[in-house]
Amino acid sequence: MDEMKIGSKFMKNLVVKPVEKAVKKRTGCEVGIQLNELAVTVTDGKTARVHMDVDVEMETSELMKYLKINGLV
């Protein structure tokens, strides 16, 4: 079983910035993402389990826009 945990602020930023840009490009919504924890466990060489603890901050208008884009409102 292999395990990788990302805990440093630098590494978290390397993960978060492209995700923020992808959300902006796909939905047009400005979001602030804080990655608190990321852990990846590979058990049998074929299956990976990913655990993420994430906080997302956005304005209420952006949230409503996102929900409408995804047909949730």
Image (cartoon, rainbow, N blue to C red):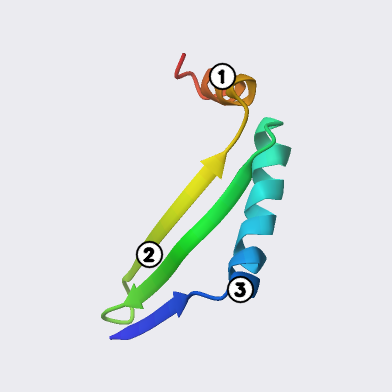
> At 64% across and 39% down in the image, what residue appears?
31
- Measured along the vertical axis of the image, is residue 40 above or below residue 54? below
- 45 left or right of 63? left
Q: Name the element at disc 3.
A: helix
Is 73 located above or below residue 49 in the figure? above
What's under tag 1, amino acid-wise? Met
Residue 11 pos. (x, y %): 61, 73
Q: With 67 as the anchor, is 2 left or right in this view?
A: left
* Residue matched to label 2: 50
Q: Residues within 10 Å of mark 3 (few under 14, many from 20)?
A: few
Q: Which residue is mark 1?
A: 64
Q: Quadrant of residue 62?
A: top right
Tag on residue 11?
3
User: Residue flagged by tag 3: what amino acid is it?
Assistant: Met
Residue lying furthest top: 73
Q: Is residue 19 above or below residue 1?
A: above
In terms of sequence position, does the residue under pointer 2 or pointer 1 come before the other?
A: 2
